[in-house]
Amino acid sequence: MLKSPLFKGPLTIIAILISFDSSAEMMTVQEVKDYYHGGMSEELIATSYSQGVFDGMIAMEGARRNEGKGGNEFCDLFEREQNDNPIRHPAYRTEQLIEDWQEGGYPMDAPFADLAISYLSGQYGC
């Protein structure tokens, strides 16, 4: 069972399922930010969405590396993982990352994936 204070068991899962539309959609940085002001269940939605975006990008880069197709992104991230020094998942810093994005003057109507790739490349790039 997850130890996160955001996870409260089956009721949380039901709330998430009810909250989401049946179709997947890309969210902007502003939309993810707005979820952080809607209470605990909406904060969980924002963190989960962020985790999915980050996981997808890292998994795609990992697949490229495993297939021998290069792998020029997030070098430090993969090196730390290989050296048994993994990072804490960036999704847990989503609210701060959004604040930094906004203070940096980046567009809030940009896809959240832009924020994620910018963060990963800036922190763990080759």
Image: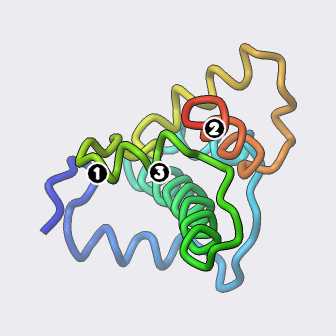
Q: Which of the two discs, 3 and 2, sits closer to the camera?
A: 2
Q: Nearer the viewer, residue 123 or 82?
A: 82
The residue at 17%/62% (across/down) is 2
For the N terminus, the image quarter is bottom left
Extreme top residue here? 103
User: Residue 73: horizontal and vertical position, in percent?
Assistant: 65, 49
Mark 2 surroundings within 10 Å by alpha-carbon count, few (fewer than 14), some (14 through 19), many (20 or more): few
**2 lies left or right of 42:** left
Whether tag 1 and tag 3 are in contact, CB under 8 A, the answer is yes
Are discs 1 and 2 less than 8 Å apart at CB? Answer: no
Q: Name the N-terminal-most of marks 3 and 2.
A: 3
Q: Position of residue 119 (x, y in %)?
A: 63, 35
Residue 47 x/y as whole percent? 47, 51
Q: Amino acid at mark 1?
A: Leu
Please name which of the two marks, 1 or 2, marks the residue nearer to the observer: 2
For residue 3, side relative to residue 50 (left or right): left
Residue lying at 74% horizontally and 40% vertically, measured from the top left: 30
Q: Which residue is mark 3?
A: 47
| Picture disc at residue 126 | 2
Front-most of 44 and 60? 60
Which numbered disc, 1 or 2, marks the residue that appears first in the sequence?
A: 1
Q: What residue appears at the point 55 percent right and 45 percent down from the top-left corner?
A: 75
Read off the residue under disc 1: 6
Real-space Cα distance between discs 1 and 2? 33 Å
- CA–CA distance in space, label 3 to label 2: 26 Å
Find residue 109 and report its image quarter: top right
9 or 28: nearer the eye? 28
- Name above or below for residue 7 compared with residue 90: below
